[in-house]
Amino acid sequence: MSGQSSSGSALPADEVGIEIRDVSHHYGGRNGQGGVTALDHINLQIRPNEFHALLGPSGCGKSTLLYLIGGFIPVQSGTIATARGTVTGPGPERGIVFQNFALFPWKTVLQNALYGLEKLGLPKKEREERARHFIDLVHLTGFENAYPSQLSGGMQQRAAIARTLAVDPEILLMDEPFGALDAQTRRVMQEELRAIFERTRKTVVFVTHDVQEAVFLADRISIMSARPGRIQHVLDVAVDRSGGDEVMKRPEFVEIGEHIWGLVRDQAIAATRGAH
Amino acid sequence: MTRSASPSLPAARTTGRTAPGPDAPVAGIWRGVYRRLTGDAMIQILVIAVLLIGWETVTRLGLVHPFLLPRLSAVLERIFNNMLAGKVFTDLGLTLYRAATGFLIGTAIAIPLGVLMARNTAVRWFFDPLISIGFPMPKISFLPIFILWFGIFDTSKIVMIAFSCFFPVVSATYSGTLGVDKWVIWSARSFGATPNQVLREVVLPMALPQILTGIQIAVPVGLITTVVTEMLMGGPGIGGSMIAAGRFADSVGVFAGIVEIALLGAVVVKGVERLRAYLLRWHHEARH
């Protein structure tokens, strides 16, 4: 299949990774005075081809960090670098999936998947093949000509994932992608995402506030503190994942989940108290 | 690479399909016709029919003096005779030409300016107060000055119409463009779209529902302005003919004008509704 063969990136896989060095970010105020400190001296190395979760309470700046990596907002202090060099703006090698899908609503599923491929300037036949391949990968075959408004939330997010994967990014940034979905759909999507990850092996940065989700999906988890956002712990989730859904019931998973919840709990409480 | 036997698509397979499938052609059409006949359209036609029958009955029974309210049949006869003489078509044609030209000029200025206002602070600072003052004011009060500037023929009328149509469209475009959320724009940028491509390929389509709403306000406003300018300035056109008929105490002629302009308005407004439904066929509102 074309998608599989072309999923090798331009660079050797083991050079890709994300280096976040001493990154701080402020909202509002002038010259760092006043306003809100969203991120406070973040240092983090995200390994090539790992599934990395940024876990923390709402408002801890984890989405801000993701947007900085994506290049959507300018880095104020510190540096963020990938194998392609320092991040200065968005680029197709860093694909992003948002919580609210952010599909182009006037385009069909197929046209959405084609958008990035057109920007890459691929020949028409190859664009079509790749778009269809990734639509198939997220199980949307048969819905190529549906508009996003005709699809359920889960299907819209599948379409958004296909659109992003189609351009074959080295890094996949995911901003609480399943946060808007119902519990059952979320569960299925998590399994499928992990399966897609096993097959395509990209560097994934996954923002979530859901401990279970982070434990189920990620190889490593960075736990962030309530505002101002700092990295408090970086944990390895070194467990055997074979067996899909059943994995979550295994004692080692439950144990890691409990451990992380213990670490996150105080921050979550701090966040709710500090919010007002 | 083998794909897992049956793709697990929970619930979505059934709930997600709202587009007419290939299995529903003939029955669907008839259901549509039936709904049309029994639904809103039927009620609308019925109400209008009752009104028209009431009109004819009241006048035939001599309950109203024919000078105040002539018979519907007399009005229709007049319209028919005017059609044979070609007067209906020159009047309607002229009115429509002025309305359409003015509307197109107004819109052609309003849409780019609305986009510019949303994207450029200096442009916004300059035009925002002007539009805030201009939007609620009766634009027709500019007619005397437009007549002085542009003469008593079509130019001043068309400028007046363009001026009236401009305001609803510019403010709808401005707020529509401003309201496009950043996620969709970021998505496009992450695929490598340039700022110009983002504007053309993302911002304008996203703002289209609001821009069309502005246009749907501007169209009747344009028609009203056309008829009013024609009435005030005289000459051929529906408004002018109606004023002329009024001067000669020809109430049948006045009512003929009213019926013609009502039909023209209904056709144009329905047409714009159809255009909207077509352009926004991807939108939630297209599926009720």
Image (tube, rainbow, N blue to C red):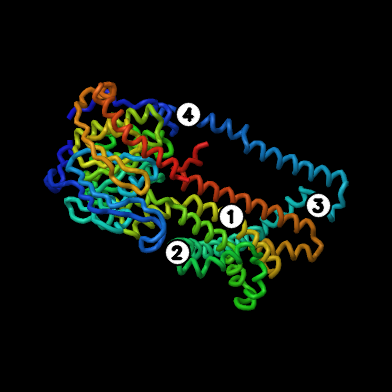
Spot occupied by residue B23 in the image (x, y as percentages of width and height): 42, 27
Q: Earlier in the sequence, mark 2 or mark 1?
A: 2
Q: Position of residue A88 (x, y in %)?
A: 26, 58
Q: Which mark is residue B70?
A: 3
Q: Chain of mark 4?
A: B
Residue at 58% x, 72% y is B155
Mark 4–mark 1 distance (CA, rounded to whole Å): 36 Å
Q: Chain of mark 3?
A: B
Q: CA distance from mark 4 to mark 2?
A: 48 Å
Residue B116's disc is 2
Task: Give whichever of A130, B20 is nearer the camera.
Answer: A130
Q: Is residue B88 left or right of residue A17?
A: right
Helix, strand or loop at label 3? It is: loop
Give the residue pinned by disc 4.
B26
- Label 1 crowd (10 A; few <14 / some 14-19 / many >=20): some
Task: Check the picture and name the quadrant holding the N terminus of chain B.
Answer: top left
Corner quadrant of residue A257: top left
Q: Quick one: label 2 or label 3, which is nearer the N terminus?
A: 3
